[in-house]
Image: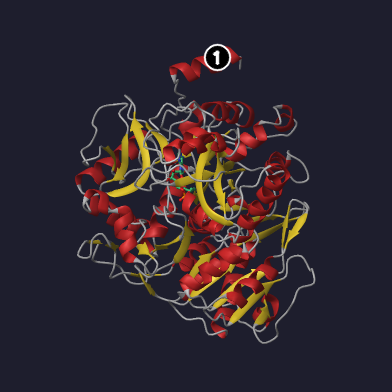
Amino acid sequence: MADELIESILNESRSFAPPKDFIDQANIDEEKVNNLKKQAKENHIQYWATLAKDQLEWFQPFKNILDESKAPNYEWFNDGVINASYNSLDVNASKSPNKTAIIFETEDGKSEHITYKELLSKTSQFANGLKKLGVEPMDRVVIYMPMCPEAVIAMQACARIGAIHSVVFGGFSSNALKDRIEDAKSKIVITADGAYRGGNIIPLKQATDEAVSQSSYKVENVVVFQRTGEKIEFNEKRDVWWRDLVSNCDSNCDPEPLNAEHPLFILYTSGSTGKPKGIQHSTAGYILHAKTTFSWVFDIKNDDVFWCTADVGWITGHTYVAYGPLLAGATILIYEGAPTFPDVGRFWDICEKHAVTIFYTAPTAIRALMKHGDEIPQSYDLSSLRLLGTVGEPINPEAWMWYHRIIGQERCPIVDTWWQTETGGAMISPLPGITETKPGSCTTPMPGIDVDIVDELGEPVGEANQGGYLVIKKPWPSMLRTIWGDNQRYIDTYWEKFDGRYYVAGDSAYRDEDGCHWIMGRIDDVLNVSGHRLGTMEVESALVANEMVAEAAVVGRPHEVKGESIFAFVVTKGERPIGEDAKKMQEALREWVAEQVGAIAKPDEIRFSDNLPKTRSGKIMRRLLRVIARDEAITQDISTLEDESIIKQLQGED
Ligand code: WT7
């Protein structure tokens, strides 16, 4: 496609209708979706009840649908009894025992297929192992694993026995792991001896040892899956090898009958304070939305090979790796390693090798791979692909067009799915056989999801192209239930702004003339770095925890590949470092933040000044810092600034 054409698309914001052959075979057609939307509009509660009955297997059916008595702690189906692992594994292992559930591709290029029957028996065996360690319903279990089938097995095993899993991304540091162990009071940690990443080994067990030894909450056992065979420290009293744990365990384990509202998992995500929030999800409501959105948005068919590149350490890896696809009986691909190993063609190589049909990734990955040109993907056979997806941040139209043209070869619809850790599953997204897509827009809400854009007073903006707060006006089954251990923070963060009337997502957005939604970004002090949410305060607290640092302010700056990069302004305790000293200290602080939080939180740039710009009342002028970080001209009034002379230092000119 010629450059002029792309240009015109961007200018005219052209839309792309689904290809005719896609429409003809799509799971949901226009009539069906209109029908669903009509039902949801006429009777929101009944709509969800019908879906929950049709889509899930209940041990005991529910009579209550939505319980608003403790709003905004809404409950769904709360007299029903169910099990998430039963719905994922037993149901599908009895329907199609020999169907492949997981294709596992290792970083060094080997692969393995696991059927539903095998996945059920491995999960049951491990669930029995956890029971042997004394794990009971409601106990928290931290999972700190590489991307491999055992990570999914560990999650499903927890679900099976009613333990609450808290997966911690393997890229987080031992310190971040420790905080999460303490906050959730987890008596078990499941980890591996190491994780392969980009040809290196990440020492997960070592990080676990550090976290556990520093944790104020006593971890009773560490279960270690052997992935790399590297030599590790082994504490005989506390540690147990995964294989030893399961060796005498039965491969049948009755799924625990659990209340629909039983917490399925906690997943920590960043907010506007330094302390991550443990987002708590329920069982029935969560799996209902995971299953239905998976089937609708990804148009899943029996012979599809679905690949979501997200790690299970993020919500995307929960909903569209560990739960949604398995609930729908689909075949998923799990890739262990880095997208650039051994070279930047690896993703496309995997698509070709395993004939992937549906590919779901983040805009940052698309931009990173796009940088290496068209020839690399073009040298692979990508003809198996039929549908593409993106998630995590707004996708810029240029990257969308490249994805469409070079990866989808103009044949595959693109679903740009807007959602959050808190929403549990996709909320605004095209339905690929129906929705006309526009590069950069996540288009329209899912049936049953009541989205609006409101002004400062909570009034709908009404008009097209008018920006405002993105809110959800009615409760939905897969909404978060609370913040683990801090219900007040749940209320304050998501409900207080509009007096409990709506769920406030924390994004600003607008709707265009065609009813398509465009996400403009976060309205709080939250950054989106490579599709991962990171609080500016989290990075600031890490910086000030360093003995050399007196004060720090962190802002985001637009970045070509990462979406946003991290820019830190730091005041040191002694003299302001300059020249070589400044360079050394920058490096030391970057490493420090990586140790405190994880490599994703490393500031891309650090600038030292004698002071931070503050108003006379002592407030840090963040807007000014954002302007400076972007190298833009300062147009705002700085007369209220306490000390104008530091501007040059902040601009890096002094
Ligand atoms: C925030 C949620 C949902 C899983 C991955 C991130 C941004 C997410 C989109 C999208 C524009 C998006 C929002 C949201 N976001 N998807 N398709 N278009 N922005 O989950 O870490 O909970 O972050 O990511 O700002 O609030 P998360």
Instruction: Using the image as rendered, state which of residue 21 and residue 235 is in the foreground.
Output: 235
Which amino acid, mark 1? Leu
Give coordinates of residue 623: x percent, y percent.
42, 37
Instruction: Give the quarter of the image for residue 222.
Output: bottom right
Q: SS class of the residue under badge 1?
A: helix
In the rendered view, would you say 81 is above or below 278?
below
- The residue at 43%/54% (across/down) is 271
Quarter of the image for the C terminus: give it.
top right
- Is residue 256 visible in the rendered structure shown here? yes
- The residue at 60%/55% (across/down) is 593
Instruction: Using the image as rendered, state which of residue 466 and residue 123 is in the foreground.
Output: 466
Give coordinates of residue 603: x percent, y percent.
60, 47
Give coordinates of residue 239: x percent, y percent.
66, 80
**Which residue is labeled 1 in the image?**
5
Q: Is residue 550 left or right of residue 150?
A: left
Instruction: Give the quarter of the image for residue 640.
Output: top left
Q: Is residue 301 left or right of residue 523?
A: right
Quarter of the image for the N terminus: give it.
top right
In the rendered view, would you say 303 is above or below 255?
above
For label 1, the crowd category at 10 Å Cα-Cα, with few meaning under 14, some 14 to 19 and many 20 or more, is few
- Is residue 26 visible in the rendered structure shown here? no
